Image: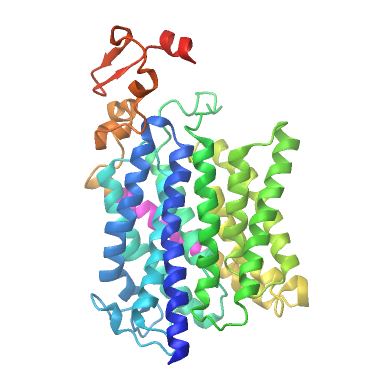
């Protein structure tokens, strides 16, 4: 009984850390997008935490953890996830809450890739579909004891495949169907860089995500007495640090400057990549995985731009490509079955299969969701809404009140913008006051 109390405290705390990561997603995406769309990305995170969480509790959990006969889909526990039978010393409520945090995170991966031009109603529909169908099915295959990939022995401890690769490639598919932001690419194929609104804000978001990742990975032990808990935590830290280090130095060499957005995404890439194997690798392996992921994210970002797919925050490169790599990396670095550590290639083959399934399912699911939205709510914002900014178009409020910056100036110097309904200082006034 005492162990159950301790486990309950640990898992509920870890679940709170995972759910707090949504604040990190909100700040990260708000900082990376342009000012006129900062409120919209925050509102999408609220959709994740409200509609997405309820949809998962009602239907998605049953599809993921319900009983089945073929290893493909659960068919019980709909509307009653608390009835799940756990063999461990843990109340069902704590387990459901923790899994809810994972489900919500999968939606937020897609949020960043479709930022600044997606119809808000379409995003609500997407959040529901991800938590009802797309993520729960992948979770069932990888984590349900009867799931077909689980039975084959695929190792995906905390979700490099089931969450990140699936979410990242769903984001790739949706961004592809949605099309780039207006003016993002030129006719000759070159890309125009849209300056992010607030890098310090994005950095704060990355710090919150990094903090929450300890709950994301170590919390998945579901057992406060698990001897692997500390190893998981230190591997998580080392991979994030080495991913950021690799991205930092590579941008200095390649671009001549230490790029903050790439460094942020390098850290996140290391965290994504180590998530699958954090419980079964050494600390040196965690560093190696982080370094490789920090390199992958930069070249993956360049590839995405070359394909003229617009991903404002780098979600596809961080989560999709490094979720795929992290899944495969288990077959290379696993302490007891890895190719590099034991010379045995059998686990690598199984991990390759898991990575292919996750990426393919994510891309198919993302294409499906985009097409459904096109036929129902409409997938993309109108040209006027995009020009005006989704903050005012969908929410009626700007992220930053321009008037407050110039309160000491006479009102005669301001222009009234009918499209936004606020008083804005013209460029010449802004230049005077800095």
Which residue sits at x=76%, y=70%?
340
**In the image, is residue 434 part of the stretch drawn in magenta?**
no
Residue situated in front as seen by the camera: 76 or 239: 239
Which residue sits at x=24%, y=33%?
396
Residue situated in front as seen by the camera: 154 or 408: 408
> Is 23 positioned to the left or the right of 415 in the image?
right
Secondary structure that dominates the magenta span = helix
> Is 294 positioned to the left or the right of 416 in the image?
right
> Is 59 positioned to the left or the right of 38 in the image?
left
- Residue 277 position, x and y percent, is 62, 70
**In the image, is residue 357 part of the stretch drawn in magenta?**
yes
In the picture, the quarter occupied by the N terminus is bottom left
Which residue sits at x=35%, y=83%?
68
> Is 73 positioned to the left or the right of 332 in the image?
left
- Residue 297 position, x and y percent, is 62, 48
- Residue 304 position, x and y percent, is 55, 41
Given the current orientation, which residue lies at the most extreme front position?
A: 408
Which residue sits at x=62%, y=64%?
236
- Give the colour scheme of this rendering: rainbow
Res 290 seen here = yes
- Residue 206 position, x and y percent, is 53, 49
Quadrant hosting residue 380: top left
Q: Is residue 426 above or below residue 280?
A: above
Residue situated in front as seen by the camera: 367 or 163: 163
Given the current orientation, which residue lies at the most extreme bottom position?
A: 1
What range of the chain is rendered magenta?
Answer: 356-372
Q: Is residue 312 above or below residue 342?
A: above
């Amino acid at each position: 009984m005492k162990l159950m109390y301790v486990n309950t405290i640990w898992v509920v705390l870890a679940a709170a850390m995972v759910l707090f990561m949504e604040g990190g997603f909100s700040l990260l995406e708000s900082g990376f997008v342009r000012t006129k769309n900062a409120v919209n990305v925050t509102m999408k995170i609220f959709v994740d935490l409200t509609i997405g969480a309820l949809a998962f509790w009602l239907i998605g959990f049953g599809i993921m953890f319900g009983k089945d006969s073929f290893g493909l889909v659960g068919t019980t526990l709909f509307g009653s996830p608390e009835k799940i039978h756990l063999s461990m010393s843990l109340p069902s409520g704590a387990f459901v809450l923790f899994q809810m945090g994972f489900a919500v995170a999968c939606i937020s991966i897609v949020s960043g890739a479709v930022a600044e031009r997606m119809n808000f109603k379409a995003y609500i529909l997407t959040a529901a579909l991800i938590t009802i169908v797309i993520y729960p099915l992948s979770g069932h295959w990888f984590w349900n004891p009867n799931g077909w990939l689980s039975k084959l022995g695929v190792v995906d401890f905390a979700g490099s495949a089931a969450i990140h690769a699936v979410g990242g490639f769903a984001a790739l598919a949706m961004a592809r169907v949605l099309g780039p932001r207006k003016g993002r690419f030129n006719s000759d194929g070159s890309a125009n860089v849209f300056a992010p609104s607030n890098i310090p804000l994005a950095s704060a978001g990355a710090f919150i995500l990094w903090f929450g990742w300890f709950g994301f990975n170590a919390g998945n032990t579901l057992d406060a007495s698990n001897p692997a808990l500390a190893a998981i935590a230190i591997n998580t830290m080392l991979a994030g640090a080495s991913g950021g280090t690799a991205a930092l130095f590579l941008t200095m060499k390649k671009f001549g400057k230490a790029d903050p957005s790439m460094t942020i995404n390098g850290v996140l890439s290391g965290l994504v990549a180590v998530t699958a194997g954090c419980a079964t690798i050494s600390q040196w392996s965690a560093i190696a995985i982080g370094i490789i992921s920090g390199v992958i994210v930069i070249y993956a970002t360049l590839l995405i731009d070359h394909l003229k797919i617009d991903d404002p925050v780098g979600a596809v490169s961080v989560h999709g490509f490094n979720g795929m790599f992290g899944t495969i990396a288990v077959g290379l670095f696993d302490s007891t079955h890895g190719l590099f550590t034991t010379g045995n290639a059998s686990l690598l083959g199984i991990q390759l299969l898991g990575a292919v399934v996750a990426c393919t399912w994510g891309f198919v699911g993302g294409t499906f969701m985009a097409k459904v939205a096109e036929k129902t709510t409409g997938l993309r914002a109108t040209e006027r809404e995009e020009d005006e900014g989704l903050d005012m178009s969908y929410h009626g409020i700007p992220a930053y009140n321009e008037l407050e910056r110039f309160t000491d100036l006479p009102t005669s110097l301001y222009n009234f913008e009918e499209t936004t309904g606020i008083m804005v200082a013209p460029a010449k006034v802004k230049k005077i006051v800095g």
